Amino acid sequence: KILNDIDLEIKKGERIGIYGESGSGKSTFLNLLTMLIKPSSGKFYIDDQIIDTQEKIRLYQNKITFISQDTFLFEDSIKNNIILNNNDNFDEKKFNYALQFSQLKDIINKFEKGTDYKVGSHSRKISSGQRQRIVLARAIYNAKDILVLDEATNALDEENETKIFENLHKLDKELTIIIVSHNIKNLKKCDKILEVKNKVLNIKNN
């Protein structure tokens, strides 16, 4: 088994930080939390209602925005990668906020045609850090009830990573945020910090 005896309650609006050594089970925990995989035993509840059918699982997953370290971009413009081609319901104010949040505003001018600049999964003209910032902007623009970040800033320099984590903690408290980070300093402002070690989740004093 990768993880044993998980007994955890997450309240709406909480900021949960997770850390642990490579291979300790952090990503497995996130996959359980987002119900991408099923536990070998135990039950999952939302508001005291057990989530035990595919329909309930899908309704729950539709409330989640999941960002991993493996970023993916479409062969399209920066703008369409952020708004997911939903131009009919484009919200300029929300779009500009997403650019500012992800620290993209300062580098957009470096691209020919700005946010209309074409990027993609095989583009060599942008860095891995820029790629991650575009995906972060996409997550903020399309934010749902639960935001999950699995090492989603590991390609950023320390200054930009710090700014993004500061922005995360300023987000609306209606949004529940779960963060896995390689740098425990990024988790200091979280309401609850969990260490994954020896197949268990240990709640650490913050």
Image (cartoon, rainbow, N blue to C red):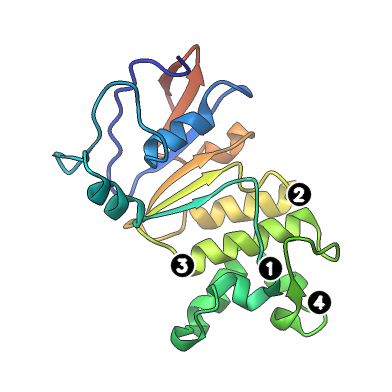
The residue indicated by pointer 2 is 157
Question: Rounded to the nearest whole Å, what is the CA distance between mark 1 and mark 4?
Answer: 11 Å
The structure residue drawn at horizontal position 48% and vertical position 18%, both measured from the top left corner, is 2
116 sits to left or right of 99: right
Quadrant location, the N terminus: top left
Residue position marked by numbered label 1 in the rendering: 104
Q: Which residue is mark 3?
A: 142
Name the one closer to the observer, 15 or 166: 15
Q: Cα distance, mark 4 to mark 3?
A: 23 Å
Along the polypeptide, which appears first: circle 2 or circle 3?
Answer: 3
Report, in whole angstroms, how far the alpha carbon at label 1 lies from the one at label 2.
13 Å
Residue sticking out furthest to the bottom: 88
Tag 3: Cα neighbours inside 10 Å, few (<14), some, or many (≥20)? some
The answer for how far apart the CA atoms under marks 3 and 1 are is 16 Å
Q: Residue furthest right?
A: 125
Which numbered disc, 1 or 2, marks the residue that appears first in the sequence?
1
Q: Residues within 10 Å of mark 4 (few under 14, many from 20)?
A: some
Could you give the CA–CA distance between mark 2 and mark 4, rounded to whole angstroms?
19 Å
Q: How many marks?
A: 4
Residue type (three-letter) at the residue carrying disc 3: Asn
Earlier along the polypeptide chain: callout 4 or callout 3?
A: 4
- Residue 111's tag is 4
Q: Are marks 3 and 1 in contact (CB under 8 Å)?
A: no
Asked if residue 138 is positioned above or below residue 17 in the image, the reply reads below
Res 145 → quadrant = bottom left
Which amino acid type corresponds to the residue marked 2 in the rendered image? Asp
Of helix, strand and loop, which one carries label 1? loop
Residue name at image x 70 percent, y 54 percent: 160
Residue 167 is situated, as x and y percent measured from the top left of the image, at: 54, 58
Instruction: State the SS at label 4.
Output: loop
